[in-house]
Amino acid sequence: MTIPDIIIAIDGYSSTGKSSFAKLVASGFGFLYLDSGALYRGVTLFAQRMGLIGEDNVVSDALETALEGLDLHFSAEGKTCIGEDCVESEIRSMKVSSQVSPIAAVPYVRAFVDRKLHELASSGRVVMDGRDIGTTVFPNAQIKVFMTASLEVRARRRYDEMVAKGETPDLEQVAANLQERDYIDSHRSTSPLKQAADAFVLDNSQMSMGEELAWLRGVVQGKFGIYD
């Protein structure tokens, strides 16, 4: 199937498998994958290292100036880096997960990440995931997907992912963290998480990755009248 030079925006709740799905789509379609969530996590880790997140997750105003010198980028292998330091594992920790939503709600942080994404997506043929890609970052994306799944399924996925990394999480705590992130993401004043009016909804609670990719192929074929 020949895919035109389009942007595919994938939004949705935490632990719905957005990143894994986006990577599979990029591989299957021959697109460049951009992980917006990794950039927000990278900023969060940077703020933690700089001591710029206080009690009750209050973000210091000094972060805005500090971001001017932040070299946050993806390596050739798609790993998240701060300068020459690969931080892919650190940004997936519970410590970062517990503070990424407050950081992502800060307007100047969102502007910083948006600039990065627009630079990387200038030539098209990209797929990216996040929480406001189809509504704010790329509202003119030709294909928009909104992913969802039950809280129970999402918590188990996140739990299993952490266990596989050698961590010892508590399933109830993981579920509570997801609920908190859902609320913060959906109620923030700047670019809240919501389904774009023209997005295709994908509930993958009971779907395999292969079934998800087949579903998207059908969406693209229907959208552009591709039958080969």
Image (cartoon, rainbow, N blue to C red):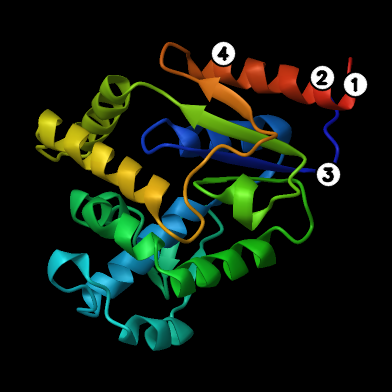
- Label 1 vs label 2: CA separation? 5 Å
Identify which amino acid the numbered label 4 is placed on. Glu
Identify which amino acid the numbered label 2 is placed on. Gly
Q: Which mark is residue 5?
A: 3
Vertical comparison of 125 with 169: above or below: below
The location of residue 228, given as percent across then percent down, is: 89, 16
Q: Which mark is residue 211?
A: 4
The location of residue 132, given as percent across then percent down, is: 54, 50
Front: mark 4 or 2: 2
- Label 4 vs label 1: CA separation? 20 Å
User: Can the viewer see residue 86?
Assistant: no
- Label 4 vs label 2: CA separation? 17 Å
Q: Secondary structure at mark 4?
A: helix
Front: mark 4 or 1: 1
User: Can the viewer see residue 69?
Assistant: yes
- Label 1 vs label 3: CA separation? 15 Å
Q: Earlier in the sequence, mark 4 or mark 1?
A: 4
Front: mark 3 or 2: 2
Q: Residue at x 25, y 28 (%)?
A: 155
- The reply to whether the C-beta atoms of the residues labelled 1 and 2 are less than 8 Å apart is yes
Q: Secondary structure at mark 3?
A: loop
Q: Secondary structure at mark 1?
A: loop
Identify which amino acid the numbered label 3 is placed on. Asp
- Label 3 vs label 2: CA separation? 16 Å
Q: Which mark is residue 222?
A: 2
Q: Residue at x 14, y 40 (%)?
A: 167
- The reply to whether the C-beta atoms of the residues labelled 4 and 2 are less than 8 Å apart is no
User: Closest to the observer: 133 or 214?
Assistant: 133
Which quadrant of the structure image shows residue 223? Answer: top right
